[in-house]
Image (tube, helix red, strand yellow):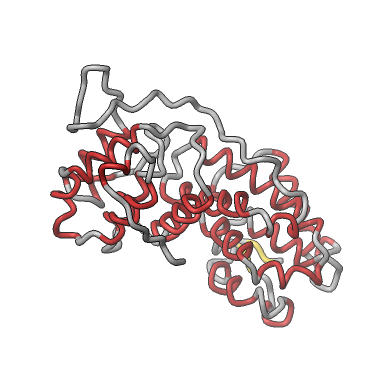
Amino acid sequence: MAFPYQRWLLTEAVPSQNREALACFWLAAPEDVLESLWNSPVGQASQQLISQLHSQQTFTPAELELRTGIQQHLQQGLDQPWAAQLMLANFLFSPPGLLKIVQVESYFPAWLVEGYRALYERNPGPSATPFQGFAPPPSPQPMTPDFGQFPATLQELIGNRIQLNRMLGLANLYYIDPEDREIYQELVTLRRQLAAAIERCAPNQLEAHWSSDLGDRYWAMVRSGVQKEPLELVDEELKQAMVKRLSPAQGGGFHLPNAVNALLVAMLFFEPGSMKVNEAEQKLPAWLLPNYQKIFAEAIATTV
């Protein structure tokens, strides 16, 4: 993904809400001057823009694309060399009160830990000014932005960039902070909706759909780790229904129609490494086999 670079002025960044330019600046900043930049007018402008974010913030398509790219890199881990730049850029799209980093001290230097805590763990009163030019963050309301209705079919989903980016963003945010129950609840609801869309898809269309951006979003959800959470009854019933459709002992199997659909749904509910398809090389299509083997073909707990 190519990050946008355009002419801009720091003095106009806050009035024009130019989060995109500041995020790109942080992504390109040298690591050895990050602290001084954070304490400079660049950092002050960033802190002001962060403090203005709220739970119902609307981002432009370009901002959504940039945020998704940042979070996709963060999914690789907070111990990577570029993590500080990524997190500073990520702050610009993360409302105060809606981002939590577990054991933040383990990953970032003291100045960034202090900046994170001032932005996301404190609720300073009207007279408190943790940083020069930093406005106290508003009290976020626990409300979910309206992304519109989730598409009923995979074909519609592929053409809906907002929902595709939402899928990736939720998967990445849960991976970073699985203790955020709002992100968790939104992700499991989306998983249920995605499973229904997969069920409706004609098997001969799956390969084309998984070669699009949908495939990346799907595997991000599978890798998010949300499968380790206890399932609600409706999700447990769906999971067991997929197992029945895939298991020869229960009258199912990969020789039946829509078996690949059932497997794609099942992998959204089985924790990676906890399920194995016997003779996967013979049963699974070539477009699905590599990712299945990479994620699931270890530590067998359930065989289908």
Residue 150 visible in the shown view: yes
Query: In the picture, which quadrant includes the C terminus?
Result: bottom right
Residue 78 visible in the shown view: no
User: Is residue 176 left or right of 296 when viewed as pictured?
Assistant: left
Q: From the top left corner, tell me how far across and down residue 159 is, in percent.
A: 69, 58
Q: Residue at x 62, y 41 (%)?
A: 147
Given residues 24 and 169, the one toward you in this image is: 24
Q: Quadrant of residue 253?
A: bottom right
Q: Residue at x 49, y 36 (%)?
A: 57
Q: Quadrant of residue 40?
A: top left
Q: Residue at x 44, y 52 (%)?
A: 67
Q: From the top left corner, tell me how far across and down residue 167 is, in percent.
A: 58, 51
User: Is residue 140 left or right of 298 when viewed as pictured?
Assistant: left
Q: Spot the residue most to the top.
A: 126
User: Is residue 29 left or right of 194 when viewed as pictured?
Assistant: left
Whether residue 211 is situated above or below residue 84 in the rendered picture:
below
Whether residue 181 is situated above or below residue 23 in the rendered picture:
above
Q: From the top left corner, tell me how far across and down residue 8 is, in percent.
A: 32, 52
Q: Residue at x 66, y 77 (%)?
A: 287
Q: From the top left corner, tell me how far across and down residue 248 is, in percent.
A: 81, 67
Report how many numbered discs are placed on residues in the image.
0
